Image (cartoon, rainbow, N blue to C red):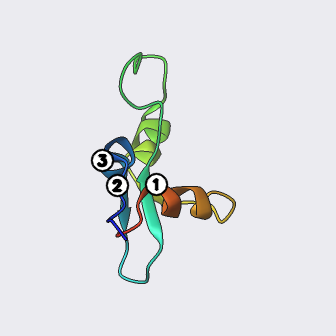
Amino acid sequence: MPKIKSNKAAAKRFSATGTGKYSRNKAFSSHILTTKTTKRKRNLRKSKIVDSTNVRQVARLLPYL
């Protein structure tokens, strides 16, 4: 059986944690930052764990992560 290719777009956006979960960065933090509050921008810097409803989709895109 041949190896499955990882989706490179997904590989750049998701990474595995030590416990096997997937982490992601938050959206809406790249431009038009003058209208966003400092608190909102600070919270956007933090990473999040991928929601349980999307774990199966991410795992399919990244079979060896």
* Quadrant location of the C terminus in the rendered image: bottom left
Q: Nearer the viewer, residue 44 or 12?
A: 12
Q: Kindly identify the residue that appears in the image at 41 percent across and 60 percent down.
A: 62
Q: Which residue is mark 2?
A: 6
- Of the numbered discs 3 and 1, the one sitting upstream in the chain is 3
Q: Position of residue 41 (x, y in %)?
A: 42, 37
Q: Nearer the viewer, mark 2 or mark 3?
A: 2
Q: Are marks 2 and 1 in contact (CB under 8 Å)?
A: yes
Whether residue 10 is visible, yes or no, is: yes
Q: Nearer the viewer, residue 31 or 35?
A: 31
Q: Amino acid at mark 1?
A: Leu
Numbered circles on residues, count? 3
Q: Amino acid at mark 2?
A: Ser
The label shown at residue 12 is 3
Q: Kindly identify the residue that appears in the image at 40 percent across and 32 percent down.
A: 29
Q: Are marks 3 and 1 in contact (CB under 8 Å)?
A: no
Q: Amino acid at mark 3?
A: Lys
Q: Quadrant of residue 30?
A: top left
Q: Which residue is mark 1?
A: 61
